[in-house]
């Protein structure tokens, strides 16, 4: 007998929270908001889970995802041009998703 399990927004966020340490040893919690494939590489996008300012609410942090399974690593991007390209592709894919039938069903619009 199958049982429907409803995942609340809070549950989703807790499952997608990652703690990252900066260069100074400070640990911050980030919410995973998406992963895309761009030119054969995978890139992950995060926002602060507990933003302190409006500016931080809009900030997106991105990393290159390398490895598989337990050996996966998030590597910082240092090439400004690549960062711009990857972020533009993320925005494009996000916009396409938001306009898709699947997204509209999730939002309750039929």
Image (cartoon, rainbow, N blue to C red):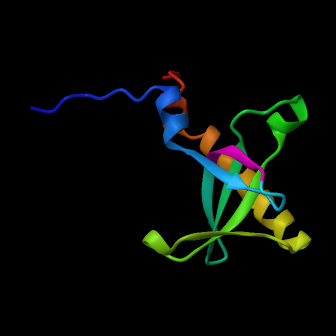
Q: In this orientation, does residue 71 appear?
A: yes
Q: Quadrant of residue 83?
A: bottom right
Relative to 87, residue 7 above or below:
above
Q: In this orientation, does residue 95 appear?
A: no
Relative to 81, residue 51 above or below:
above
| Residue 45: image location, x then y, percent | 68, 54
Q: Quadrant of residue 78?
A: bottom right
What residue sits 36% from the left and 26% below the top? 6
User: Considering depth in this image, is 85 or 16 the residue closer to the camera?
Assistant: 16
User: Considering depth in this image, is 91 or 34 the residue closer to the camera?
Assistant: 34
What residue sits 45% from the left and 70% below the top? 70
| Residue 98: image location, x then y, percent | 63, 39
| Residue 16: image location, x then y, percent | 54, 44
Relative to 23, residue 12 above or below:
above
User: Considering depth in this image, is 108 or 4 the residue closer to the camera?
Assistant: 4
Residue 34 colored in magenta in the image: no
Q: Quadrant of residue 97?
A: top right
Relative to 41, residue 102 above or below:
above
What residue sits 79% from the left and 58% below the top? 87
**Quadrant into which the N terminus falls:** top left
User: Considering depth in this image, is 54 or 93 the residue closer to the camera?
Assistant: 54
What residue sits 80% from the left and 34% below the top? 57
What segment is highlighted magenta in the picture?
26-33
Dominant SS type (magenta): strand
């Amino acid at each position: 007998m199958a049982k429907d399990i409803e995942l609340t927004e809070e549950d989703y966020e807790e499952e997608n929270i990652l703690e990252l340490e900066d260069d100074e040893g400070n640990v911050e919690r980030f919410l995973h908001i998406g992963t895309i494939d761009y030119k054969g590489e995978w890139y992950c996008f995060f926002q602060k889970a507990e933003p302190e300012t409006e500016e931080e609410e809009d900030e997106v942090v991105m990393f290159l995802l390398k490895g598989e399974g337990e050996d996966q690593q998030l590597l910082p991007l240092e090439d400004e041009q690549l960062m711009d390209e990857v972020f533009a592709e993320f925005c494009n894919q996000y916009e396409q998703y938001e306009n898709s039938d699947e997204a509209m069903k999730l939002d309750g619009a039929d």
